[in-house]
Image: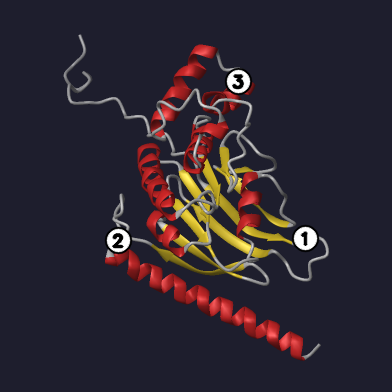
């Protein structure tokens, strides 16, 4: 029989397995892009890191490279220098770990809402029963449980964008990329979708990189707002938004942060106008 010193302690515990690392770390490292026939870089040496589960919004004047940055993260265009990585893997092409939502919903008009949402799952070869279950959950997530059998032309603009978001989320991506998805909607519908997007993000903890022209929209949604410099596109400033979610959009705290960001963008626009005027005077 083993002596007491050799007996295993009753209090001894099996070492706990480390928690799995969170997915969705998106990194852009010294990313630059020059388009043909353009005198300046669309973006130049941009470094941006979106932590897993973080909601990052990019704002800035027109032509500052916001959408270019998003398209490189999506793998839709290649950087000339630097690159983008997701969870340590370099992004070369679009992939299932990222999903994109555009300003125009891009739904197939000959399909119902359900069929649009399940399209990617069908192409992936997922069994019909599992597809149906995931599509219904996605419809409930975007508050459209009874709209699945409707064709695109039977849906309002806001409903179409919700279907587009459901189509992206049903693929369970690690990162959601959103390029001005609400800009064509009326103010009341945008406010509703801001509230619903907050709910979805809080429930799913996806990393979100979101581009918008609206400073109010940026502050309503973001953990961090990235303000762009133009000609060439660079990061001018980053503003953390330390207001708890879900947010009261009429909060004076939101108004204060909106004021700070608007001042930055106005200064940037004034700089661009002054440089343009100087170039014209020397032409």
In this rendering, the count of numbered labels is: 3
Q: Residue 44's quadrant in the figure?
A: bottom right
Residue depth check, mark 3 versus mark 1: number of the one nearer the observer: 3
| Side (left or right) of 191 relative to 12 | right
Residue at (32, 57) in percent of width and height: 249
Residue at (29, 61) in percent of width and height: 250
Vertical relation: 33 (above or below) 116: below
Q: Position of residue 85 (x, y in %)?
A: 60, 47
> What is the distance, in whole Å, between disc 3 and disc 2 at their CAs?
42 Å
Circle 2 residue? 250
Residue depth check, mark 3 versus mark 2: number of the one nearer the observer: 2
> What is the distance, in whole Å, between disc 2 and disc 1 at their CAs?
41 Å
Viewport quadrant of the N terminus: top left
Residue at (39, 29) in percent of width and height: 140
Q: Position of residue 189 (x, y in %)?
A: 42, 48
Q: Are marks 3 and 2 in contact (CB under 8 Å)?
A: no
Q: Position of residue 265 (x, y in %)?
A: 51, 73
Crowding at dot 3, Cα within 10 Å, few <14 / some 14-19 / many 20+, comes out as: few
Q: Position of residue 81 (x, y in %)?
A: 72, 58
Crowding at dot 2, Cα within 10 Å, few <14 / some 14-19 / many 20+, comes out as: few
Q: Residue 97's quadrant in the figure?
A: top right
Residue at (65, 64) in percent of width and height: 45
Circle 1 residue? 35
| Side (left or right) of 143 relative to 272 | left
Viewport quadrant of the C terminus: bottom right
Q: Element type at marker 2? A: loop
Circle 3 residue? 122
């Amino acid at each position: 029989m083993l002596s007491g010193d050799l007996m295993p302690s009753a209090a001894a515990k099996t070492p706990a397995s480390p928690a799995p690392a969170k997915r969705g770390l998106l990194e852009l490292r010294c990313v630059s892009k020059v388009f043909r026939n353009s005198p300046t870089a669309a973006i130049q040496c941009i470094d941006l890191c979106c932590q897993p589960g973080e909601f990052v919004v990019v704002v800035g004047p027109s032509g500052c490279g916001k959408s270019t940055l998003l398209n490189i993260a999506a793998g839709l265009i290649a950087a000339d220098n630097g690159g983008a990585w997701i969870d340590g893997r370099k992004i070369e092409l679009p992939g299932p770990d990222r999903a994109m939502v555009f300003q125009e919903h891009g739904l197939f008009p000959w399909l119902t809402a359900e069929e649009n949402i399940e399209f990617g799952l069908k192409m992936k070869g997922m069994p019909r029963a599992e597809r149906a279950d995931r599509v219904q959950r996605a419809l409930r997530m975007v508050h459209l449980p009874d709209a699945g059998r409707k064709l695109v032309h039977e849906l309002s603009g806001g409903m179409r964008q919700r279907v587009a978001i459901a189509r992206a989320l049903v693929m369970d991506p690690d990162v959601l990329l959103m390029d001005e998805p609400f800009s064509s909607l009326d103010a009341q519908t945008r406010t509703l979708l801001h509230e619903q997007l907050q709910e979805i993000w809080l429930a799913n903890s996806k990393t979100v990189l979101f581009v918008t022209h609206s400073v109010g929209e940026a502050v309503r949604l973001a953990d961090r707002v990235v303000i762009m410099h133009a000609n060439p596109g660079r990061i001018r400033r980053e503003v953390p938004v330390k207001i708890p979610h879900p947010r009261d959009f009429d909060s004076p705290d939101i108004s204060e942060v909106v004021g700070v960001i608007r001042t930055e963008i106005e200064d940037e626009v004034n700089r661009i106008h002054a440089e343009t005027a100087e170039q014209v005077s020397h032409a």
